[in-house]
Amino acid sequence: MAVPVSGERPIPGVPEQIATRMAFFIAGFAIAAWAPLVPYAKERLGIDEGVLGLLLLCLGIGSIVSMPLTGILAARFGCRRVIWCATVVICLALPFLALASTVPSLAVVLLVFGAGIGTVDVTVNIQAVIVEKAARRAMMSGFHGLFSVGGIVGSGGVSAFLWAGTTPFVAMIGVVVLILVSLFAFGRALLPYGSERDAPLFVVPRGFVLFLGVLSLICFLAEGAILDWGAVFLTSVREVAPAQAGWGFAVFSIAMTICRLTGDRIVQALGGFRVILFGGICAAAGLAVVVLAPSWLVALIGFGMVGLGASNIVPVLFSTAGRQTVMPPNLAIAAITFLGYTGILLGPALIGFVAEAFSLSVALLGVAALLLFVAASARAATRVSS
């Protein structure tokens, strides 16, 4: 456990590092467990794609609304209490995602579920910054890698249970049990505090922190572009069969997960500046390959390049936010997470508007240009502002 020093707050050690990894795993596992239920919800409610899109927006709205408040809650009550409470909210919501039989009821459950997910996401990043500082070495990429692993296990595990004939409700009960077992096993090592001493409870994001938030928004927008439009591009532009179109996101996810799990060593060896510079260029080039490659098999290489390049940029941005002194780290993390989620929520819709006005290829090349802006901002993004 954390060791107290001279009456100060306990210094995080190995147990806190393990607990942080498990908290990231739980966050990724929980949100991914919902994805296989979407077709079941659509069929159960008898709704079209338009109504389903509005329902899915509720999850993002719940997350975004909760995020600005989470930095305050973590400062006042500590990471441990906030993560425990938000995780319990997630566990209460999960079974109802499989049972809600009307559009209004599912909308309310998704709002609550999204609020829990958003709260956990911000708080684990606040804890990750504190733990990384105490360890005095790069750890953020590995933490985010466990989120990706949780996502793969959550979506894959639930899909396997549903394929085997398990009902969505029973599958969600299984998810809840696994989450609670993990929380009880590792949750006691979560930090009982969540901010610097005597930090104000609210500061308006500005300057350097706002700049980091914009870069985070672009990276999340690129991730949302692959998630929501990658398969559409392959089917509509490259005329790939729908059954094969999911390979683009699969290659992207695998590349991102592997690079994040090994990213701490990469960041330690290269430094944050080179990770953002080369990562932004690689991700932008990958999108260009996706759009311009004549063969969809070659385009898969592009999807992998996007995952490889973008994988460690956001962890570096979070680490930088934890070191800056423009505003308290807990509030800075909440701010850039909020902006990042805004990108992943609103970005795909913006891409849709551009695609309708011009073409999907033009829209994706526009995202590539934004990633080049991230690369060009590498030096400014890795300085520690005061």
Image (cartoon, grey):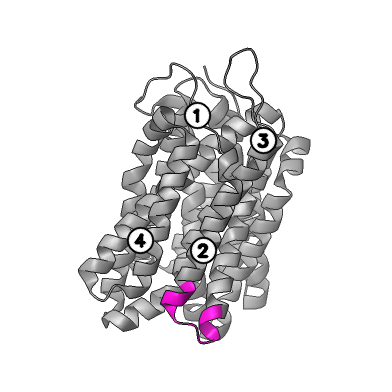
Element carrying mark 2: helix
Nearer to us of marks 4 and 2 is 2
* Residue drawn at 67 percent across, 39 percent down: 15
Mark closer to the chain start, 4 or 2: 2
| Residue type at numbered disc 3 | Gly
Q: Is residue 4 visible?
A: yes
Would residue 294 be found to the left or right of residue 386 on screen?
A: right
Residue 298 spot, x, y in % from top left: 67, 72
Would you call the spot at circle 2 few (<14 residues within 10 Å), some (14-19), or many (20 or more)?
few
> Which dot, 2 or 1, sits closer to the camera?
2
Q: Is residue 87 above or below residue 122?
A: below
Residue that label 3 marks: 272
Farthest residue, direction top: 6
Sequence-first tag of 3 and 1: 1
- Looking at numbered disc 4 in the image, what kind of residue is underneath it? Ala
Quadrant occupied by the N terminus = top right
The residue under label 4 is 349
Judged by depth in the image, the label closer to the viewer, 1 or 4, is 1
Q: Secondary structure at mark 4?
A: helix
Foreground residue, 209 or 105?
105
Q: Is residue 323 above or below residue 253?
A: above
Q: CA distance from mark 3 to mark 1?
A: 27 Å
* Amino acid type, label 1: Tyr
Q: Amino acid at mark 2?
A: Val
Mark 4 residue crowding within 10 angstroms, few (<14) / some (14–19) / many (20+): some
Which region of the structure is painted magenta?
161-171
Rendered residue at 35%/77% (across/down): 41
Tag 2 or tag 3, which sits nearer the N-term? 2
Residue wearing tag 1: 193
